[in-house]
Amino acid sequence: MTGDTLRAVAVVPARDEEESVARTVQALRGLELDEVVVVDDGSSDGTAAAALAAGATVLRIPGHAGKGGAVDGAIDRLPPADLWLFADADLGVSADGLGSLLDVVRSGRADMAVAIFPPQFGGGMGTVRRASAAAIRLLARYRAEAPLSGQRALTAACLVAVRPLAGGFGMETAMTIDAVRAGLRVVEIPVPGLTHRATGRSLGGFIHRGRQGLQIARASLARAVRLR
């Protein structure tokens, strides 16, 4: 890119998302982005092939690095960018709504913009979300409405401030804490129509949220220790 145009790259972590990743990539390619990168975190299905066919650059992670590790490793392998957009692979066509996050960061109104999902059916009981919000409030004095949202646009300087990214599903909670502590401007923006696959209240859903809660606790504890 030349002149004062900012290079913007989307990073989409994915594991066994063959059914939705192509629609997500296609929606993101309709935004003002220079590249859409899918990070295939050890998928056992056709996630990588579907993403490639949809026009994404695909980086494959051998084994399973977890969400935060996969994204952090991918950033090390990518050329520098001025703006970054993180998006989950299961957004499908609703990913086109993330342009509002890019607009806020591109215009200089925030260093990090986080998407707020509309109310959705089929989720859990909110225990992990409340725990994450409490950790952010305690450690960064910031009241987060969408502490677990993986849909985030941020500047290159903000990305430096929040790296290395916390492991697994602790990534988002830690990003908010680290950005606010660094004195950066974090805003949360409702994105109408944004949707993703709910984990539900099945046994698998509770196991997923238990793992998520442990990883958030680990990331939060690491940041609590730094306050001492």
Image (cartoon, rainbow, N blue to C red):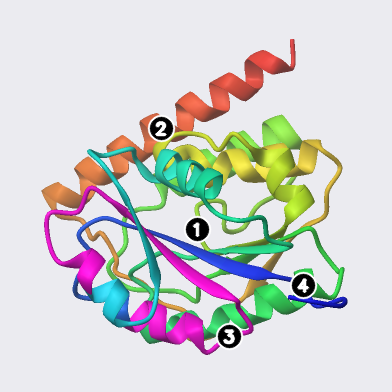
Alpha-carbon distance for marks 1 and 2?
A: 15 Å
In the structure shown, which secondary structural element does the residue marked by tag 1 occupy?
loop
Q: Are marks 4 and 2 in contact (CB under 8 Å)?
A: no
Instruction: Please identify the residue farthest to the bottom as the structure is shown.
Output: 30
What crowding class fits label 2: few (fewer than 14 Cα within 10 Å), some (14-19), or many (20 or more)? some
Q: Are marks 1 and 4 in contact (CB under 8 Å)?
A: no
Q: Would you identify the image quadrant in which residue 135 lies? A: top right
Give above or below for 75 relative to 53. Answer: above
Q: Which residue is mark 2?
A: 215
Tag 1 or tag 3, which sits nearer the N-term? 3
Alpha-carbon distance for marks 2 and 3?
A: 32 Å
Numbered tag placed on residue 48 in the rendering: none
In the rendered structure, does residue 37 fall within the stretch colored magenta? yes
Is 182 in front, or is 10? 10
Tag 3 or tag 2, which sits nearer the N-term? 3
Q: Are marks 1 and 2 in contact (CB under 8 Å)?
A: no
Q: Which residue is mark 4?
A: 6
Give above or below for 31 relative to 89. Answer: below
Tag 4 or tag 1, which sits nearer the N-term? 4
Tag 2 or tag 4, which sits nearer the N-term? 4
Q: Which residue is mark 3?
A: 31
Is 81 in front, or is 113? 81
Q: Which residue is mark 1?
A: 150
Q: Would you identify the image quadrant in which residue 89 lies? A: bottom left
Give above or below for 37 relative to 76. Answer: below
In the structure shown, which secondary structural element does the residue marked by tag 2 occupy?
helix
Relative to 81, 200 lies left or right: left
What crowding class fits label 3: few (fewer than 14 Cα within 10 Å), some (14-19), or many (20 or more)? some
Q: Which residues are magenta?
A: 23-49
Identity of the residue drawn at 30% across and 79% down: 22
